[in-house]
Amino acid sequence: MAIEPQALLQALQTVLDPLTGRDFVSTKALKNLQIHGAEVSFEVDLGYPAQSLWPELGQALRGAAQTVAGVGQVQVHWQTRIVAHQVAAPTVPALEQVKNIVAVASGKGGVGKSTTAVNLALALAAEGAKVGVLDADIYGPSVPTMLGLQGQKPESLDGKTMEPLLKHGLQVMSIGFLIKPDDAMIWRGPMATQALEQLLRQSNWQALDYLIVDLPPGTGDIHLTMAQRVPLTAALIVTTPQDVALQDARKGIRMFEKVGVPILGLVENMAMHVCSRCGHAEAVFGLEGGQRLAAEMGLQCLATLPLALAIREQADRGEPIVVAAPEGELAAQYRRLALRTAAALSLLGRDYSSKLGALKVQSHP
Ligand SMILES: Nc1ncnc2c1ncn2[C@@H]1O[C@H](COP(=O)(O)OP(=O)(O)OP(=O)(O)O)[C@@H](O)[C@H]1O
């Protein structure tokens, strides 16, 4: 019996992407639908990296297709196709080799911003994206330690630009590679901003889908300038659930809103400590403060991460938990954070500037 293509499309449309809430047919992610007798095949191009979801989603799509009369074998081919999205400041020159720049920020220091940035970057890479990390935390660049790169210096092949260091599949650049640990603390605003711009623009990034920028903590003038001078696609805010951190996170959210940078969501870090001996769970920094703030500000709470000894130990060892124990529950939590972050970003407006020709001006005197 011949398969009715319309019925097939309708059946496939019942499967929703759990992260965007949209189906794959109306978003045109599903392509090249072929019917050969009882055999059906199609491609799904996802706008965000989600390799861990492919088996489950593939099964759901196959199952939906097979509810249609006459459908036998179903082949699903997955592709990740990450595009560049609009930047908040269109007058700031884009980076040719970087599709999307995401700032990881926090109002308060020490809330786990860098730990989150590094594990997020690794989780995005594990899901199939090409990812870079730019550590712009001039007051305490910790990315070199967290990725086991301390003491290393980037090479310059042409005397003008620097080659990012490579670790765990990430392209990495840090202010910590270039300065002595105590020097940056005394920098004033313009120096800090200039340093960030140099790191950003004089690094030879190679075909990145995402560049994760670890900003210094705070919401002062430096941060405002940084947010305006970098072609940011979006930001995410890390906070602990305690009141002092939440107040600063609120200021951080307002700062990005002021400069028109979309906020993908909030990460509540160190939310709960589970005793490794007795299993007792304790809300060391208060209960669900990040989730409440997210609701209040109309943002998504992208993750609620526990206070876990292994996260701290692995960061100190230069082998973040996502690479040290990729199959473990903590890595799974960072993977979920990565999926939600990338999916939220994929819903932002696209950047068509590279597709448009130069504006022609005709003057008629
Ligand atoms: N979820 C977590 N569980 C346990 N320890 C954590 C967690 N997140 C971060 N840490 C630890 O807390 C300390 C501070 O983390 P991190 O350096 O990431 O914070 P930060 O907000 O970037 O700090 P800074 O203000 O210096 O930029 C580090 O020792 C880190 O290993």
Image (cartoon, helix red, strand yellow):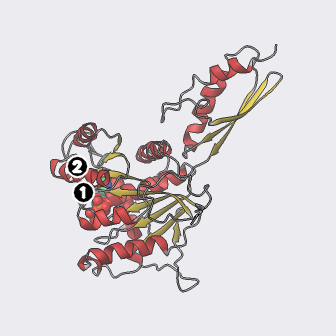
- How busy is the neighbourhood of tag 1: few (under 14 within 10 Å), some, or many (20 plus)? many
Residue at (44% x, 64% y) in the render: 92
**Image position, residue 11 (x, y; %):** 63, 20
> In which quadrant of the rendered image does the N terminus lie?
top right
**Image position, residue 196 (x, y; %):** 38, 71
Asked if disc 2 is less than 8 Å from ligand 1, the answer is: no
Tell which of 141 and 88 is nearer to you. 88
Q: Secondary structure at mark 2?
A: helix
**Image position, residue 328 (x, y; %):** 45, 46
Residue at (48% x, 52% y) in the render: 86
Residue 64 in view here: no
Residue at (29% x, 78% y) in the render: 184
Q: What amino acid is labelled 1 in the image? A: Gly
The tag on residue 107 is 1
Tell which of 271 and 194 is nearer to you. 194
Tell which of 273 and 179 is nearer to you. 179
**Image position, residue 227 (x, y; %):** 35, 61
Q: Are marks 1 and 2 in contact (CB under 8 Å)?
A: yes
Q: Secondary structure at mark 1?
A: loop
Precedes in sequence: disc 1 or disc 2: 1
Ligand 1 located in image quadrant: bottom left
Q: Is residue 20 above or below residue 89?
A: above
Q: What amino acid is labelled 2 in the image? A: Arg
The tag on residue 250 is 2
